[in-house]
Image (cartoon, grey):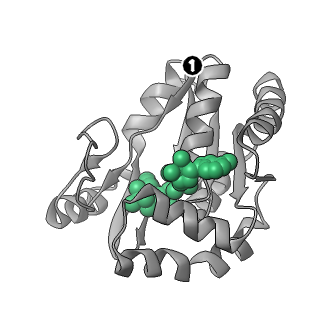
């Protein structure tokens, strides 16, 4: 079967707002569907298995890696995260456009695999201070995991230069407007 849908990759330093932006965009553009990744991280409050992530044990995750079930996977903040090949191919074969909310290395791997059928978007915070205060404001992290997340930022900003487009998420409405323009153009190509 030939793939009919396209892939849109959202990457950003943790807390920059990629989830907020991707969800806002989904309301404005038809036929955008989130890929549900697998992870070994524990669920946060309000996160549901099969909706936010497929929450797996480390043993189960590694078994799936060995079975070749992931199109890409990475270790991020001490946990494993991966995109299940069957999951996104099923959506794409049905003509659905798929949003991937994944880390920068995973994003670059997806671009290598899908080429022009993928658009890689890098979301930047206005500055590091706002990034930290957004992460704190989300109240999802302990002091320790917050530090881990901030420590990755320089590497993420460096790799983000290789993305198709970068968008600064300062004013939310402005950022959504820019994204809508870039994504619509890509989907109509
Ligand atoms: P990410 O998915 O990149 O980790 P989130 O989308 O969870 O980030 O956003 C982190 C926090 O910042 C959330 O509490 C969100 O409501 C807030 N946020 C997102 N975008 C903006 C913005 N443009 N201005 C102010 N706060 C924002
Ligand atoms: P969180 O724990 O905040 O949900 O996610 C931590 C990081 O893992 C984020 O940068 C998120 O985008 C990334 N991530 C989530 N799913 C995947 C995935 O399937 N593959 C990769 N490579 N990264 C992922």
Residue 140 falls in image quadrant: bottom left
Residue drawn at (51%, 23%) of the image: 93
Residue 44 vertical position relative to residue 180 in the rendered view, above or below = below
Location of residue 82 in the rendering, given as x and y in whole percent from the top left corner = 39, 56
Q: Quadrant of residue 107?
A: bottom right
Locate residue 6 relative to residue 150 in the image: left or right. Answer: right
Residue 48 drawn at (x, y percent): 25, 39
Residue under the point 42% across and 71% down: 76
Q: Is residue 86 visible?
A: yes
Which residue occupies the foreground of this view, 17 or 99? 17
Give residue 129's position: percent from left, percent from top: 66, 73
Point out residue 128 in the picture as x, y percentages from the top left corner: 68, 73
Q: Is residue 101 visible?
A: no
Q: Secondary structure at mark 1?
A: loop
Residue 78 horizontal side relative to residue 121, left or right: left
User: Could you tell whether 2 is left or right of 176 in the image?
Assistant: left
- Beta carbon of the mark 1 residue lies under 8 A of ligand 2: no
Q: Would you name the residue on which mark 1 appears?
A: 95
- Asked if residue 148 is positioned above or below residue 27 in the image, the reply reads below
Residue drawn at x 34%, y 76% is: 78
For the residue pair 20 and 75, the one nearer the viewer reads as 20
The quadrant of the rendered image in which ligand 2 is seen is bottom left
């Amino acid at each position: 079967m030939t793939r009919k849908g396209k892939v849109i990759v959202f990457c950003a330093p943790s807390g920059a707002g990629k989830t907020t932006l991707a969800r806002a965009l989904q309301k404005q553009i038809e036929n955008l569907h989130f890929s549900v990744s697998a992870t070994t991280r524990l669920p946060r409050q309000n996160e549901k298995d099969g909706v936010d992530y497929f929450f797996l044990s480390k043993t189960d995750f590694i078994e799936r890696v060995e079975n070749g079930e992931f199109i890409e996977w990475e270790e991020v903040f001490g946990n494993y995260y991966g995109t299940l090949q069957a999951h996104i191919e099923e959506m794409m074969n049905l003509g659905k456009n798929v949003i991937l909310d994944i880390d920068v290395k995973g994003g670059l791997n997806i671009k290598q695999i899908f080429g022009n059928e993928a658009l890689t978007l890098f979301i930047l915070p206005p500055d590091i201070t706002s990034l930290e205060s957004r992460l704190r404001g989300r109240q999802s992290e302990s002091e320790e995991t917050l530090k881990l997340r901030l420590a990755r930022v320089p590497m993420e900003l460096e790799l983000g230069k290789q993305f198709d487009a970068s968008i600064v998420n300062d004013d939310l409405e402005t950022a959504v407007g820019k994204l809508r323009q870039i994504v619509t153009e890509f989907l109509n190509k």
